[in-house]
Each structure stands twice: as structure tokens, then as C-alpha cells.
Image (cartoon, rainbow, N blue to C red):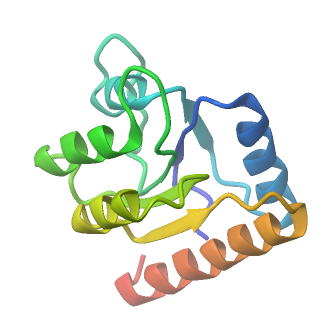
Amino acid sequence: MDKSVNILLVEDDDVDVMNVKRAFKKVNISNPLHIARDGLEALAMLRGEGMPLIQPRPKIILLDINMPRMNGIEFLTELRADPALKAISVIMLTTSNEERDKVAAYNLNVAGYILKPVQWDNFVHAVSTLNMYWELIEMAHGA
């Protein structure tokens, strides 16, 4: 993946943040990874409201569903309603296997829905698959 592409991880669990960082390193994803603890913090980072603006704007957001203050579905609803942010690719990365969460996420045009596996090897494989997906998207868009 183009190493200048910023990635935003919206995740409130420190262990999950660490696992994403470790998985990125294992599959050689060296893109800048920005961390927001919930949907409100993520929106502030994307809009530069009370927090430094992420520049260039992330092309990919990895989003948890279960978070305090503003959960993933609420964040996604807000993101898709914002003309400046609605085109960002969002991949759900969550422990929620609830059908209503999946339906809500896909109705809000997520690029994928990955259940956080308990097993480390499965998680690394999922991140590796994401990397291949991003590379295909970049080739298709000539980025």
C-alpha cells in the first residue's frame, strides 16, 4: 500500500490497538496509523476541531462498534452525512457478531466487516487480506 496513506483506527481497547499495530508490523504495513478512542474523537481528528487535523485525510478507517460516548454505527452515520468525509473507506473491526450491527454497517457502505478473532494467526491473516484489498483498490484508481 502507498506508504503516504494515513489510516485511522477508532478503537477504545488498548489491547486491540496493540494487536492491530503488531499485525501491521508482521505483514509490513508501515502506513501512519492514527488512533482515536471513540467516534467523537475520530470526528474531531478528521475535522481538525479541538485536535490536530490528520493530513492528508485518511483513506481508510478501521472502526470498532462497541465504544463509549459515540459508538461505531453512530460515527459511521455521522461520517456518511458529511460531504467532506463520506467517501472514506471504512472497515469494521469488531467483536460484535450481531446481525443488526452487520446490517447497519453495510447499509452505511462499509468496505468490509471483520470479526476480531481471538486467535492471533487469524487476525494477522485478516490484516494481510486487508492489505491486498487496499493494493487492489489503489491499482484500480491509479493511485
Query: Where is 8 relative to 139, above or below?
Result: above
Q: Position of residue 9 (x, y in %)?
A: 55, 43
Q: Position of residue 73 (x, y in %)?
A: 32, 46
Residue at image position (32%, 57%) is 88
Residue at image position (27%, 29%) is 47
- Which quadrant is the N terminus positioned in? bottom right
Q: Position of residue 46 (x, y in %)?
A: 34, 34
Q: Residue furthest top?
A: 50
Query: Where is 15 relative to 82, above or below?
Result: above
Q: Position of residue 56 (x, y in %)?
A: 41, 44
Q: Residue 14 appears in which quarter of the rendering?
A: top right
In this rendering, position of residue 117 left or right of residue 38: right
Q: Nearer the viewer, residue 118 or 48?
A: 118
Residue at image position (70%, 72%) is 126
Query: Where is 74 relative to 38, above or below?
Result: below
Q: How many marks?
A: 0
Residue at image position (63%, 81%) is 132
Q: Residue 116 appears in which quarter of the rendering?
A: bottom right
